[in-house]
Amino acid sequence: MENEFDIEITTGEKDSETKDVILPLNFLSFGEIEPDDIKVYIKQNVYKALEKYALSNTSKELGTILIGDYCEQLGKIHVVISDYIEAKYTDATVSTLTFTHETWDYIHKQHDLLYPSKRIIGWQHTHPNYGIFLSNYDLFIQDNFFNMPFQVAYVIDPVQNIRGFFQWKNGKTEKLKGYYVYDDVGIPIKIEQKKSASPKITKAYPSKVMTVLLSLFCVLTVALGIFAVNMNNKYNEQLKLQETISNKLNEQEKTISEQKANIDDLQRQLVNGILDTSGTTTAEELIKRIENNEIAIDNQENILKQLKELVASSAENDEDKTVRFVAYTVMAGDSLSKICDEHELNYQANKNIILSLNGITDPNSIFVGQVIILPIQ
């Protein structure tokens, strides 16, 4: 199984922009819409496409990334889901779904190619025949990689024909009671709902009533016997499935804990290898240590060039100021541009040296708990 920390999410610069979003005018509500909940609108063709995709394979979990936009009106968040990207190249079983490096490479390319002006609004995955909820591993993914206030999770059980959205509310993930299906003005919204068949009433002549009743009784007795046997078998199968899922969840929790410890250790090694015992280092000292091969670092020539340009720029602007590097731990809701603003750093001027020094390939892919080294004057 691939490392569960392969999941990346684009928030950062795109999500920090304020955009005017026109809310749908043609929609139907499903479930109970709570006043203080996030309002989720999913386009009719996306809703139907996800239902069809969920039914395409019920032997394992399937997933997608939800694309769209959001806005805030009267203090309420409105999320509009207009498109989706299929999560290809995943590692999946009946109770797990792992996004691999190949999955995210495909998603980022499709996002940039097809929906460059839209945001990643959340993610969707299936639970074949075991209900609508977020497992401990699902919650870990939501908490660490889809933690923006507007990002939702959508779960579909294609076997039981049920579905539901999950939102951020009061600092934790909660299930939405209701949502909207929308479309362009003038296009009718038709969502098929299963209906119970109306019972047919059969009239019998008085002379045949007893014969019919006895026949029905015999048939019913046999049917109940068969039904009881089938239900007992299904119950035993369900118990085995629940036991298997429970074991897998326990294994996933153990793996997550071990991987988090490994990541924390690697981050400490990175910071300790660059910063001195006081927790800082100057650009001049860092240049000297890299040139003397005291620090093993990727893209060494490129980083040296950027460090020297940074020192030259600082000396040109203010001879009394020294560029120093310090460590910063990423928190929920952070992006590189936001972090730079809070430390009074010019994001565009310092972006390349921050990415290179920290080994970050995508400025939109940082996660909670990650340690980043920043240049401070």
Image (tube, grey):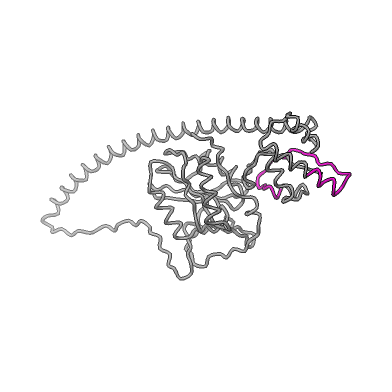
Residue 348 as seen in the image, left or right of residue 184: right
Question: Percent x, y for residue 128?
Answer: 41, 43
Depth order, front residue of 98/143: 98
Residue at image point 19% right, 58% down: 202
Horizontal side of residue 126 vs 150, given as left or right:
left
Q: Hey, which quadrant is residue 235 in on the image?
A: top left
Viewer-closest of 357 and 107: 357
Q: Residue furthest left?
A: 207
Q: Is residue 119 magenta?
A: no
Please name the residue shown 38% across and 41% down the image. 59
Q: Position of residue 50 (x, y in %)?
A: 44, 53
- From the viewer's perspective, is residue 284 above or below residue 15? above
Q: Which residues are magenta?
A: 310-338
From the viewer's perspective, is 323 left or right of 6? right
For the C terminus, which image quadrant?
Answer: top right
Q: How many marks?
A: 0
For residue 182, side relative to residue 266 (left or right): left
Q: Give the x, y percent position of residue 295.
A: 72, 30
Residue at position x 70%, y 38% from top? 301
Q: Residue at x 70, y 47 (%)?
A: 351
User: Residue furthest toward the right?
Assistant: 320
Quarter occupied by residue 290 = top right
Query: Horizontal and vertical percent for residue 319?
Result: 88, 45
Q: Is residue 315 magenta?
A: yes
